[in-house]
């Protein structure tokens, strides 16, 4: 008899798991959720046409139960909650049995069921199970919805073909859980200032036990596509996931994304590897194929659950997360202007076969590598496009830590002091590494998301200075990106390669801003129940698969 964990079982139920496929009866209009296609409606008992519908949408908890599965010391991990989610689909009430995630289950007191009944939840992709032979089963679970969460909807109701290709939307996936610099320093018996000041990082994101690079990539893709008309999915011709922490050595994560979003099957799909510039290196190929007519749209995703040997500087600021850029000829909010790279054989950071953690070359990593390669690419780009840095309104760089990026900002005189001395308004700098940690392949992309997915940026300068550089409201100086503004993005990948891409804000960006859930709210969600949750170092190591249960 075939084990229920065998691959044939998973293949037969993949669509149901990935897209929560339900069935709608043509005669009575009722919708039912089942693992088998029925020829007769279970509601009215009549025959008719059974149509498939996707039930991936927000709902409320109708029933919930928990299990406390595993324990490390005094801390519980892999706790599970299961229940029934009730959703309203076209006026029809549908109940879906599901597993819930990101719910805190107390270790030594009664779990209050009534507290959760009626709570709003939203779908998310997570690990459902693991085959003993190595297959990972992914599927939709539901997680608590932040109280103040703004639902994203398409910023235009149709696809608008633009003169030049570029970025049509940016989606992110940020884990709920975090660990602070102080907590890490306490348990590793080091000075917290080594992290706070030496690396410039205050806290790092931590995946839940059922999150990995693939689930983060899928959620980021869904987030980006939610801002575009549904028909954009049919125009996708390329999906690439750049990562240093793939779940599989051979199987790509990009096919998980393709299956989840329902993209066409005749497309280019692969995973990319070039350390932290893995996704950045895909921008030029995607743009080139769009310009030649080979494809219309590409999903470029940077996703990582970054790791370092416990206590090593690489470990102290590693985070987790994913960003998806939709590159397209439709609904362009950031027009692509140019990109240049600078590459060479420079092994400053690597991970040999069978090694658990990467190693780095310490002094060989900074000036001769990160700065040299990234700056060479930036200088080439500025010279080729004849762009003066005074034209740059916003910028972000690769962020292995904040202090490295801060040096680049100062090097190019994009810091507040230099800009004000030149009579310019400050430059908007994307620096989420302070609250995310180093997200490897997603690092520069998170910086761009912080710039683009925010309605306005508060500038911390005094009233007189604000008046001097031309702010309309000196009492509350803010910068809003406007049509024609240029954004510089710096990229770096160990091994080594530097990159620089420049984008220009289009007239559609204003509409885009009206529909986004602001990045700052995602990063600093204040909700007591469903906002960020701080966890211990031991839970962080377990979640990142750095320690095992017996």
Image (cartoon, grey):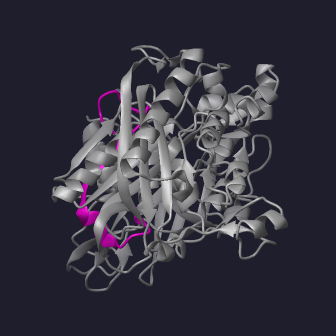
Q: Is residue 162 visible?
A: yes
Q: Is residue 83 visible?
A: no
Q: What residue appears at the point 36 percent right and 42 percent down from the top-left corner?
A: 340
Q: Is residue 223 left or right of residue 273?
A: right
Residue sitting nearer the eye, 157 or 35: 157
**Does residue 247 appear left or right of residue 100 in this picture?**
left
Instruction: State which quadrant residue 237 falls in.
Output: bottom left
The residue sitting at 16% across, 53% down in the picture is: 266
Please give the count of numbered marks on the rendered protein: 0
Horizontal arrangement in the rendering, residue 302 relative to residue 406 (left or right): left
Asked whether 226 falls inside the magenta stretch, the response is yes
Viewport quadrant of the C terminus: top right
Q: Position of residue 343 (x, y in %)?
A: 37, 28
Query: 400 or 416, which is in the foreground?
Result: 416
Instruction: Judge from the rendering whether residue 255 lies leftward or rightward of residue 20; answer left or right.
Output: left
x then y, percent, for residue 89:
43, 77
Quick one: 208 or 437, which is closer to the camera?
A: 437
Which quadrant of the rendered structure holds the N terminus? top left
Residue 344 falls within the magenta-colored stretch: no
Q: Position of residue 166 (x, y in %)?
A: 35, 60
Q: Which residues are magenta?
A: 225-252
In the image, what residue occupies the spot 33% across and 73% down? 42
Can you tell which quarter of the image residue 79 is in?
top right
Residue 377 position (above or below residue 230): above
| Residue at left offset 30%, top offset 52% | 259
């Amino acid at each position: 008899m075939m084990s229920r964990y065998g691959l044939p079982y998973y293949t037969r139920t993949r669509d149901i798991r990935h897209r929560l496929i339900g069935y709608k009866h043509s005669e009575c209009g009722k919708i039912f959720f089942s693992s088998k296609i029925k020829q007769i409606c279970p509601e009215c008992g009549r025959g008719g046409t059974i149509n498939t519908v996707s039930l991936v949408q927000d709902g409320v908890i109708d029933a919930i139960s928990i299990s406390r599965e595993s324990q490390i010391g005094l801390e519980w991990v892999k706790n599970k909650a299961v229940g029934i989610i009730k959703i309203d689909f076209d006026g029809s009430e549908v109940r879906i049995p599901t597993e819930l995630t990101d719910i805190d289950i107390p270790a030594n007191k009664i779990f209050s069921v009534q507290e959760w009944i009626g709570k709003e939840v939203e779908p998310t992709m997570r690990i459902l199970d693991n085959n003993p032979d190595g297959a990972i089963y992914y599927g939709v679970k539901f997680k608590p919805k932040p109280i103040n969460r703004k639902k994203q909807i398409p910023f235009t109701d149709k696809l608008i073909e633009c003169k030049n290709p570029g970025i049509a939307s940016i989606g992110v996936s940020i884990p709920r859980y975090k660990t602070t610099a102080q907590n890490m320093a306490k348990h590793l018996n080091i000075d917290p200032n080594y992290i706070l000041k030496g690396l410039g990082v205050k806290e790092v994101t931590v995946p839940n036990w059922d999150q990995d690079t693939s689930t983060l990539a899928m959620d980021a893709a869904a987030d980006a596509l939610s801002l575009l008309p549904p028909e954009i999915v049919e125009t996708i011709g390329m999906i690439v996931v750049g990562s240093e922490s793939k779940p599989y050595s051979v199987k790509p994560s990009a096919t998980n994304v393709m299956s989840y979003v329902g993209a066409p099957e005749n497309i280019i799909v692969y995973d990319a590897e070039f350390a932290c510039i893995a996704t950045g290196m895909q921008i030029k190929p995607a743009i080139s194929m769009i310009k030649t007519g080979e494809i219309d749209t590409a999903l470029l995703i940077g996703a990582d659950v970054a790791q370092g040997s416990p206590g090593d500087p690489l470990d102290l600021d590693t985070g987790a997360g994913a960003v998806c850029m939709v590159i397209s000829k439709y609904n362009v909010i950031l027009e692509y202007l140019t990109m240049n790279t600078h590459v060479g054989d420079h092994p400053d950071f690597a991970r040999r076969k069978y090694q658990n953690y990467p190693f780095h070359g310490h002094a060989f990593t900074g000036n001769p590598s990160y700065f040299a390669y990234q700056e060479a690419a930036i200088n080439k780009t500025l010279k080729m496009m004849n762009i003066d840095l005074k034209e740059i309104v916003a910028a972000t760089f690769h962020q292995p830590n904040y202090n490295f990026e801060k040096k680049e900002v100062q090097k190019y005189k994009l810091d507040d002091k230099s800009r004000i001395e030149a009579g310019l308004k400050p430059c908007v700098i994307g620096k989420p590494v302070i609250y995310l940690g180093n997200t490897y392949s997603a690092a520069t992309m998170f910086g761009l998301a912080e710039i683009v997915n925010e309605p306005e940026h508060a500038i911390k300068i005094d009233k007189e200075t604000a008046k001097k550089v031309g702010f309309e409201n000196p009492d509350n100086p803010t910068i809003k990106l406007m049509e024609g503004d240029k954004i510089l993005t710096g990229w770096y990948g160990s091994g080594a390669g530097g990159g620089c891409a420049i984008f220009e804000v289009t007239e559609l960006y204003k509409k885009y801003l009206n529909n986004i859930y602001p990045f700052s709210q995602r990063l600093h969600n204040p909700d007591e129940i469903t906002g960020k949750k701080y966890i211990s170092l031991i839970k962080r190591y377990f979640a990142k698969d750095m320690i095992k249960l017996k």
